[in-house]
Amino acid sequence: MDPARRSELHERVAPFADVVAQPDASLDEMTLSLSKALQPDLDILGVMTEIDVLAADCPTPTRDGVMRFLRDDAGFAGDQTDYHHWQNSCLDHVLDRRRGMPITLAVVAIEVARRVGVRLAGIGLPGHFLVGDPDDPRWFADPYHGRTDLRRDECRNLLVRLGVRRWSDSFLEPVPSRLIVARMLNNLKLSCEHRDDGVRLAIVMHARQALPEFSGEHDAAVEALAPLN
């Protein structure tokens, strides 16, 4: 690979690697650093300010109040037109379009809630993503479908409707922020492969190397550099 291209790739991914290595990094910092690796001109602080403004408009600082505000007032909903587009994995585009994948809509909810003093957590079901209350294991919300106050049995039924037959109570346990980012990287990898987007795939594969969950992918990351040669 051309040394200049390799250096450019490293410069784009290094800030993301630095952020995810920090144990106290916030979820919005990590996800926006990932977005910036794909979009070098992204103004991370500007996007964080957008989330601040969004949160300031939330009239009811409760878990249900946050979810209703994002759905009814701010207009966030699932993208059912181009679900797998890479922009649906970028928080900045989801904030701009008010459309996204379940996981990025969950990130919006978690970060808006955090700003109004409400704790929400990511819930990583197989094939879907919810938010939950870490202090109440009986409450869940589905920002993609605009549903709130889901019970545990309703979450299980949701998976059945999505074609997932196996079940474990562990599916409803909160997901650490780093694993939310890892799952977003999985979505980006699939999106770039599906669209034959070699340049973004190379960036994504090297961003994955910053997480221990993908430590065995070194050869695949190197192979992804081929389009940049």
Image (tube, helix red, strand yellow):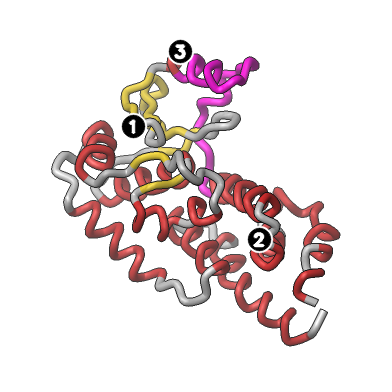
Residue closer to the observer: 198 or 108: 198
Please give the range of residues in magenta. Answer: 155-177
Q: Is residue 128 left or right of residue 96?
A: right
Depth order, front residue of 44/194 = 194
Sooner in the amino-acid sequence: mark 1 or mark 2: 1
Going by the numbered disc 2, the residue's amino acid type is Val
Q: Which residue is mark 3?
A: 153
Q: Is residue 127 above or below residue 168?
A: below
Dividing the image into 4 quarters, which one contains the C terminus? bottom right
Identify the residue position indicated by label 1 in the image.
Answer: 146
- Classify mark 3: helix, strand or loop: helix
How far across and how far down the image is residue 7, in percent? 70, 82
125 relative to 51, above or below: above
- Residue 56: image x %, image y %? 18, 54
Q: Secondary structure at mark 2?
A: helix
Residue 89 in sight: yes
Q: Quarter of the image holding residue 148?
A: top left
Rendered location of residue 107, percent (x, y): 42, 47
Q: Specify whether 3 is left or right of 155.
A: right
